[in-house]
Image (cartoon, rainbow, N blue to C red):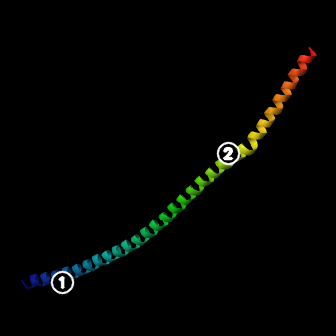
Amino acid sequence: METLQAVRDVAIIILAIETIIVSTGVLLVLWQVWRLVGVVRTHVDRLGTSSSQVLGTLRDTAQTTSETAHDAREAVGFVAGRSVLPVIQLYSTIVGASRFAEALLRTKQR
């Protein structure tokens, strides 16, 4: 019986040591997970800030592009109204007058 009691005592000691080792390992894993969560949280915050900055830049770029397109439309309208249309009208008048003169000269010759 003493042998059985000695084996039992050794088994209890081995189980106690194993429990201490496993508990220590679990605590180390939990500590590493806690640190990993902190690192991930920091990176997510940085990504959130970066994405907000990118979205702000994109919004500003879209606004600037819209303003540029509006200004270009106004410039084209101004150039068309002040330069192109008067030149077209003048050219049309000159061509019309020359055709009229040709028509008058042809009738006199006949």
Looking at the image, residue 77 sits to the left or right of residue 1; the answer is right
- Tell which of 59 and 22 is nearer to you: 59
Question: Could you tell me which residue is drawn at 83 percent across and 33 percent down?
Answer: 94
On screen, 93 above or below 33?
above
CA gap, disc 2 to disc 1? Answer: 95 Å
The residue beneath circle 1 is: 13
Quadrant location, the C terminus: top right
The residue beneath circle 2 is: 77
What residue occupies the far top of the structure in this picture?
110
* Residue type pointed to by label 1: Ile
Q: Position of residue 28 (x, y in %)?
A: 32, 78
Q: Position of residue 48 (x, y in %)?
A: 44, 66
Quarter assignment of residue 91: top right
On screen, 13 above or below 110?
below
Q: Position of residue 57 (x, y in %)?
A: 54, 62
Question: Could you tell me which residue is drawn at 69 percent across and 47 percent down?
Answer: 78
Disc 2 or disc 1, which is closer to the eye? 2
Q: Label 2, secondary structure: give it.
A: helix
Question: Could you tell me which residue is drawn at 82 percent across and 30 percent down?
Answer: 95
Few, some or many C-alpha atoms within 10 Å of disc 1 (few <14, some 14-19, many ≥20)? few
- Tell which of 91 and 54 is nearer to you: 91
Looking at the image, residue 9 sits to the left or right of residue 88; the answer is left
Q: Position of residue 69 (x, y in %)?
A: 62, 50
Looking at the image, residue 91 sits to the left or right of residue 80; the answer is right
